[in-house]
Every structure is written in C-alpha cells, then in structure tokens.
Amino acid sequence: MNQANQRLTFFSTLNERKVAVLLLAGFILHILSLFSPLSNKVVNNIFYIGVMLPALLMTRRLHIEELWSSQLVRVAIVYGVFTSLMMAITLDGYKIKYVGYFFAFLLAFYHLEKNKLFDSTIVAYFLCLFVLAYSLVQLFVFYEVNGAPLTARPWFAGWQLFTPSYFTAYISVACAAAAYCLLSRRSYVLLLILMLMVGALFVVTQTRMGLVGVLLSTPFFIGLAVKQDILSLSFKTLLVAFIGVGLIGALYKAGVFDVLTARGESYRLLIAKTAWTEGFNCNVLFGCGYAYDFALDIGSRILITEHSSYSNQMLRSGLVGVCLLLIVIISTVLSGCRTRTPWVLSFIAGCGCLLVEGQALMAQPRAFTQLIFWFPFCMVVLADLQYKRNQSTEDKPILD
C-alpha cells in the first residue's frame, strides 16, 4: 500500500513538473507576445492557452490557501473584484472576467516559483536585458533602416505598447530591480553602464514618463541599500553622490536634457484636475462609471483619455476605487520594504509612471499595465510568501 502511494506521489510530482515547464514556456511566450505586433486576440489566446490553462490545472486548495494568507493578495483581489464589477455594471457584463485574468497571472508566478523555475534575480536580469535589447533594435530600425533624422522622436513599429512614453515606462520598471541587484553584488561598472544606457534612452526618446518612475523609486533605492548595509553614509559614498549630482547638473547646463521639455506642456495637471472634478460631480463614492466619455478641449485638439491610472480610477469608480487602489499600493510598498526585495523598486517605478499615463488596471492580458504594475506586484507577493515561510520555520520549536 505504501509503495503504491509512493508511486502515485512520484507520478503526480512528475506530471506537475511537466505542466510547470509548459507553464514557463507559455509564460515566456506571453511576455514576448506583448512586444509583438500580433493582434489582441492572438496575444490573449497565448495567455489563455500558455498561462491561464496550465496555472489552473496545477492549482489545488492548499495553493489558494497559501496565496490567500498574504495580505497583498487579499487586498488586490478585493480591488480587482470591485473594479471588474464596476466595469460589468456600468459598461459590459463580460468585463467581470478581468479579475480572473489577474488571478491566473498571479497563479502563474506562484507555481513557477514553487517549482523553482523562477528566481527573482534571474528574472530581473532577463527582463532588463530583453527590454534594453529590444529598445536598441527598435531604435536601429527607426534611424538606420527607415532613415529618420537623428533629431526625430522615435516611434517604434507595432502596437501602442511601442510609443516612446510607454516604452520608457518599461525601461524604468525593468531596470530598477536589475540595477539594485547589480549594486548588491558590487558590480559598479555594469551598474554605471546600465544607468548611462537608461539615461541615454530617455533623452533619445524625448520622453519624461520613465524618468518620473526612476525619480520616484530613487529614494527607496537608496533607503533599501542603506538598510541592507550595501551603502553607508561614508565620505566615499557622499563624494560619489556629489560627483554624480555635479555631472548631471553639468549635462543639464549643457542642454542635454532640453529635448525632454522641447515638446512643451503636456497638460497632465489640467487633465487630472478635470478628471477628478468630473468624477466628484458624477458621484463622489463611485464616480461616473466606465461607459462615461471623457473629453477635454485644449484648443488645438481634444484629449479623450485621462493619461493617468489614478485619474482614470477616480473618474470611473470614485473615491472607493481610489482608496482600494491606494491600499494595494501602500501594502505592496510596505511589504516590499519589509522583505527587502528589489522588485519593490520596480513596483514603485511603475506607480510613478502611471501618474502620467495609463488606463484601468483591471484589463485584458495585452494591457500596458500588466508589465508596469502587476508584474512587479506579483514578484513582491512571491517575496512576501517566502518571508512568511521563513518566519514560520523560525517559529517552529526545535525538538530534541
């Protein structure tokens, strides 16, 4: 009987491992498809077959219980259910499934980490290298193949994910965690090269969105490094910081960063004020709903998007939606700082980018916010679960 049970356990583990490998392949294919010109339907089908299906096949009750033990998961599910329900009630009933997409995405992270196919540092390096390499290829095509002048603002070929604004957001999110990993390993030369590449890409794309994310995450970057004794407030550190600030100031005086302001006013503050005012006027608690048509006439053109996930949340679902979103963000940042995961820096960078761009956070798998917000969120959840496992192990009494 025991031998039969052992064989059953062995084959169950073997089958789960095979499904996990398929899940990894499907997950990588899904991430790659986000950067492709494939249609939304094709990308969504890749997610259904390659990510959602194997993740659900591997899920058991104990997995749900462990995930639910994380406060981050609980608050995110509450937020997701509320937002999807608001979409279903005010726009289209089928949008209730958006929270299911998010949960399947989270399950994929959970199972890949559980089967030791996901390593936080390796994922950080891979995503960083992929996004940077893809950026350089796109720039080569735009300037060299298409023959655009070097002063032209690059517009990459493909879906809306390839606009300069969106792509600098990917760069800031992908590189934040990788930069911290390099710092923690004292790889100062590689860190400097990475910082110079990111800065150059911001200047070339003439976009401020990614810069907002970097600036917001920088204080947390320094604080986390000091907390982990990677950086210390020594004379050497202060001297390097002084030289760095002086170099940036010199580049600013030389006009290197003028391209970031050359396009003039972006009307972000006016858009945010209008969106929040209209949300309050419709219904303070629940906003105007997701069928509401937003339009702002600025004279030269009419803006039809809120250009911020936070303004979108206020306009569409009121203070209830905004408060739930803030609870998710604050809980994630606090957990990330407690577990000291570098992915909290990517999450903060993504939150900064969403101040000036982005739509609803609950959306189809192709959505821009999946990589900017939910990817680093899921990585912080994995760190939170591992932290709880370690605490549980330490609290167990040692038996003689």
Image (cartoon, rainbow, N blue to C red):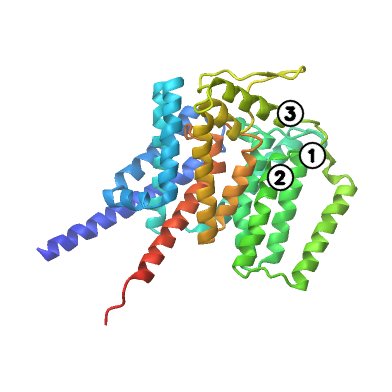
Q: Of callouts 3 and 2, which one flags the residue occurring earlier in the amino acid sequence?
A: 2
Mark 1 to mark 2 CA distance (whole Å): 10 Å
Residue at the limit of the structure toward the bottom, as seen here:
400
Could you say which is closer to the camera, residue 50 or residue 325?
Answer: 325
Residue 392 position (above or below residue 298): below
Q: Of callouts 3 and 1, which one flags the residue occurring earlier in the amino acid sequence?
A: 1
Q: Could you say which quadrant of the image residue 97 lies in?
A: top left
Left or right relative to 52: residue 287: right
* In this rendering, the label closer to the viewer, 3 or 1: 3
Left or right relative to 159: residue 382: left
Mark 3 to mark 1 CA distance (whole Å): 15 Å
Q: Mark 3 points at which residue?
A: 267
Give percent across and percent down for residue 210.
Answer: 68, 43
Q: Residue at x 90, y 48 (%)?
A: 253
Disc 1 to disc 2: CB gap under 8 Å: yes
Q: Of callouts 1 and 2, which one flags the residue occurring earlier in the amino acid sequence?
A: 2
Indicate which disc residue 211 carries. Answer: 2
Could you say which is closer to the camera, residue 138 or residue 326?
Answer: 326
Could you say which is closer to the camera, residue 191 or residue 94?
Answer: 94
Q: Residue at x 80, y 68 (%)?
A: 239
Left or right relative to 153: residue 295: left
Give percent across and percent down for residue 271.
Answer: 68, 27
Q: Which residue is drawn at 63% across and 52% down?
A: 175
Q: Which residue is drawn at 73% across and 38% down?
A: 207
